Image (cartoon, rainbow, N blue to C red):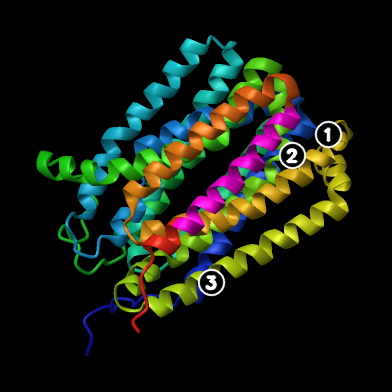
Amino acid sequence: MSDGPQPRGPDSVRRSLSWTLFGELSFALSQWLSYMIIAKLGTPEALGRYSLGFAVATPIVIAASLHLRPIYVVDVRSRWGFADFLGLRSVLLPLALTLVAAVCLLRGWPWQTAVVVMLVGVVRVSESASDIYYARAQRAETMDPIGISRALRGVWSIGLLALGLALTDDDVIALALVAAAMLLHTLLFDRRKAAAIEVPGDPTGGSLRPRFRAESLRSLLREALPVGVAATLLALTANIPAYVLEQRHGLAAVGILAAVMSIRQVSSVINMALGSAAIARLAKLSIDNARGFWRLLGKLLAVVLTLNGLGLIVIVLFGDLYLRYGYTPEYEPYVPQLVLASIAAVVLGLSNILSQTLTALSQFRMQLWINLVVVGVAAALSMWWIPARGLDGAVETALSVACLRFVIYVAANLILGPRTKA
């Protein structure tokens, strides 16, 4: 007779994908709606402050996160325990918030813009803290705690943002409510769920106390630094157009850019959800089943192409209605830019899946070099096109960079992917 609940086995890729998509789609919907709510209840400048907050905080928090979650997931040799990953992230996240504050001081933004950027930084830090707790569930291939958590985060986020704006008409107060709720969710929900998950082979067992052994932290930092820098460069690539646009054309232009690029945000969340659901399985298949690896990758690319392609068709047919009623009539003239952004989302979705396969193959340094090239191209195109062409130049930069990433990642996968035996 059993003395207690038996450890749960890994989910199938289909079940993992279902839970991941449920959570990420729910969260993406909340982020999507948040832009619309701010646009309807505020001004393009208010939307610009909000999107600028994400543009500034996201690369910094990603840099501090060091992409540790997938490294823990694919660490099949158990070189480090979960407590080591938690320790490294607990050291780096406060430094991220400090750096966000430093950027606000150096840029000299008005107080309202600076506070909004800082509050978005707190939200992003809470998400990064939850992300490391998600790693336990992902490595155990039980994705439902992640899906439920992401869905709940979306509910708290959009509900409190709408409530705060409706009651106070002040985006600072509304974002303060959201930031507080996100921190509480991390502590009261995600940490407890992580503690209930058993990860076979973890040398630190079920401990959720950060471990600060210098030798372990140094070796983990060395392992994570290339992929962490690569992820940071990727985030910078996506946000460089917003930096240049804000400096040359103001916050209102950044708000309009956020509206037309919103389809890319939802698309990227879906794409990363697909990759996250399959990355552990791809890592295992790459070792002893090359044919299965390529078959699964082909299915993932087909799903991404189908979902993003449907999104593009909807935008082509109903983009004017989306901007008019989803935002305000002030945004409707920007349908051509919205269509270009949707095309970029299709190409970017395929690139994101191909980048996830390189993570599954532990090709971290290769991603660093790829993203160094891409961020350089993004910066050059932004400086060349955006000062004179404004919003058009920002969207064209995004499309060009997406195409470049796709070509490079196709080549990298063909060269570095597992070989089928004759």
Residue 190 appears left or right of 213: right
Q: Mark 1 points at which residue?
A: 331
Kindly identify the amino acid type of the residue bearing the numbered disc 1: Tyr
Distance Cα–Cα, label 1 vs label 2:
9 Å
Distance Cα–Cα, label 2 vs label 3:
30 Å
Q: Which of marks 1 and 2 is nearer the N terminus?
A: 2
Residue 44 occupies quadrant? top right
Residue 298, which numbered label? 3
Q: Which of marks 1 and 3 is nearer the N terminus?
A: 3
Kindly identify the amino acid type of the residue bearing the numbered disc 2: Val
Point out residue 175 in the picture as x, y percentages from the top left corner: 58, 31
In this picture, is 242 found above or below 284? above
Cβ–Cβ below 8 Å for labels 1 and 2? yes
Point out residue 165 in the picture as x, y percentages from the top left corner: 70, 31
Residue 260, which numbered label? 2
Residue 79 occupies quadrant? bottom left
In this picture, is 43 found above or below 75? above
Look at 43% across and 31% down and name the residue there: 60
Point out residue 162 in the picture as x, y percentages from the top left corner: 69, 38
Q: Which of marks 2 and 3 is nearer the N terminus?
A: 2
Distance Cα–Cα, label 1 vs label 3:
37 Å
In this picture, is 73 found above or below 31? below
Magenta stretch: give its range.
391-411
Dot 3: within a 10 Å radius of its alpha carbon, few (fewer than 14), some, or many (20 or more) residues?
Answer: few
Name the magenta segment's main secondary structure. Answer: helix
Look at 22% across and 69% down and name the residue there: 200
